[in-house]
Image (tube, grey):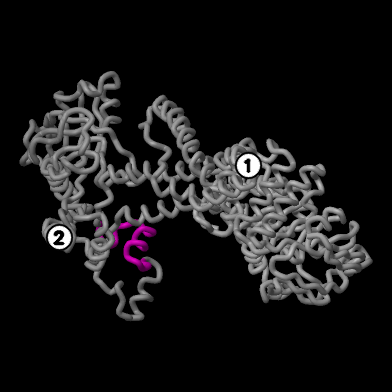
Amino acid sequence: MTFRDTFSLALRNLGEAKLRTSLTTLGVSIGIASLAGMVSLGVGLQDQFVERFTKSGLFDTVTVTPGQDLPGGLATLARGGRRGFGANRRAQRATPSPDATPLRSDLNDATIKELAGLDGVREVYPNVRAPVEAKYGSDSEGMLAAGVPMTAKDEGAFQSITFGRFFSDDAARECLLSLDMAKRIDAGSPQGLIGKDLILIHAAPGSGGGGPPSVEGGLSANASRVEDPYRIVGIIERETGPFGGSAAVSGLMIPLGRAKAIASATRALQQALVPERASERPYNALIVKVKHAQLVQDVEDQIKKKGFSAFSLNDALQGAKRGFIILDIVLSLIGSIALAVSSLGIMNTMVMSILERTREIGIMKAIGGSDGDIRRIFLIEASAIGLFGGAAGVVLGWIVGRIVNFGANVYIQNQGGTPGNLFSLPLWLIGGAIGFSVTISLIAGSYPAARAARLDPIRALRHD
Amino acid sequence: MSVLLETRDLKKHYQMGASIVRALDGVTLSVQQGEFVALLGTSGSGKSTLLNLIAGLDRPTEGSLRIFERDLAQMSGEELSLHRRRNVGIIFQSFNLVPTMTARENITLAMMFAGKPRAERDAAAGSLLEAMGLGGRQDHRPRELSGGEQQRVAIARALSNTPHLLLADEPTGNLDSHTSRDILSILKNLNQREGKTIIMVTHDASLAETYANRTITLLDGVIVDERTPSRV
């Protein structure tokens, strides 16, 4: 018997019991819908997460800090070894190891050049946070102004500036605000701030200084207070990520050149005031941008070999991906419960069908149908239920997903969040769900099919 | 004429509760090609059991059963289904047509198992039904056909894979006397014109003597009488 004949015979048999077939198929489709829906929720959440990460521009970034400067736990991770207590004992063992590399903390312009020469590195710039006091109207607030390089214009969060534009040049007295910050300054119409001036006040050694010198109570006589107006040119919707600090959007952003100038003036003053506590290095951290996200690990390793601490989101992302795999497994287990129930439905339908068609099976055997022919007919009937149920289930899951997504987004928007696709149904999931449905149906149908094949033809022919 | 079928001390015993039923208890017979043999006997005599063994629907407990030089007792399940498909066509008392299929589909089903292509199946089923006088009833389901018509469909189905041997188990048991004669005439025709060997189980001795070349009477699983009717 050819496969085609077996297939058409099986379909015909299913068509003869339309109500039972369609109820069983509906059961399977609900099972598959719940499974596909659950997995698509997992995938959707992961996509959302990864998308926000990518938008944050941190995927191609390695943050470099001085060897000893990281907090204990991170330092251990970054250096791959343990310091602090016990470090001396380890040193005494005098075994050559990667730990033997001398630690470095010289984060300066020479190091920037050095790191820029590494393979796979696109750009290196310092992570500068200039302490300023921002004044708008009568209100003022102390904060750290993040220095943003001009090259960041087409990257991460700066790709889509909600209102306004990016800086015109590195030395411009311009600033960008996060939407949160803008709302804090003017809750009513944050976009109305564009074109207005924000006064940034910082301290500088008394001898220099652009603005009119003024003596503050806490500073000694040779310090001066500099006030510069910065034009607000743009507002960025803050994309929050777990590591929003280093290169992502900060509340207040100014061109890197400006931030460097402010920071160095502040440092000069600090050195003049308390020479013994002054930092010998100009920057606290460097941001290394990598040509491709895949090179992050490689560059990170090269930097670590030089004796610096390096950290990238790669590490966090690996952990997050593991978390999502676990989430997917849990969700698919929940979804599988319905499918398990519906596979029992398939088995029940097939067993009932055998009881009903016992005589027919006897006839088929009497006129030359082999055990294998009978088994195949029933297996194809079961897998056809799986195929149709799977396809219908994917459609059903998609529809339910859209509805839930719509409701969830309305809620998210009401809560002031950003709407997104919580359910994602990629091709592999569609194919996988249908394939899984067919497989489950085949497994559920294999017992009834074997039972049908084993029927004794004489008894089957006597069956009423 | 050559020997088509030969049994030697054929036995079929069933376990029924604590006792053993000796449905066949040592049957030795041979059937020549082109014969029309009637198996006579009361119910429980073992005639249907013998027919089922020849059909390959059941296996003997002991003895040999050779058809076309091959021993059915030694065949695997797969070989037995091949035997049913190629060597024999079976006609039942209760017709045994698939109720959800039309007359034509019932016939093509048998050819489907034999792996014949669709066009060939349809053409053969059409001409078989035509030959049985059912040309206009091809698309009717069994319940839309009379008993005689259903049995003619069953005969057409038995012939569909052109077997040499036709096995009929009380083919007229559910039919009135007029229709019974029609059906037996068809079988007789197939025997005489197309040279089909026919083994028919019946309890009607007069019908058997009218149409068969030879009658074999069984009682309690053994042959008690064998005769060749004078008028053929």
Task: Return the residue at label 1.
Answer: B134
Q: Is residue B219 above or below residue A249?
A: below
**What SS does tag 2 mark?**
helix
- Camera sees residue B149: yes
Label 2 neighbourhood size at 10 Å, few (<14), some (14-19), many (20+)? Answer: some
Q: Residue at x 55, y 53 (%)?
A: A6
Q: Residue at x 78, y 63 (%)?
A: B213
Q: Quadrant of residue A72?
A: bottom left
A327 or A353: which is nearer to us?
A353
**Same chain? Circles 1 and 2:** no
**What SS does tag 1 mark?**
loop
Q: Residue at x 47, y 37 (%)?
A: A395
What kind of residue is marked 2? Thr
Extent of the magenta region:
A65-83
Query: Is residue A82 inside the magenta stretch?
Result: yes
- x, y (%) of residue A333? 56, 49
- x, y (%) of residue A453? 67, 59
The quadrant the N terminus of chain B occupies is bottom right
Chain identity of mark 2: A
Task: Return the residue at label 2.
Answer: A111
Label 1 neighbourhood size at 10 Å, few (<14), some (14-19), many (20+)? Answer: many
Marks 1/2 in contact by CB < 8 Å: the verdict is no
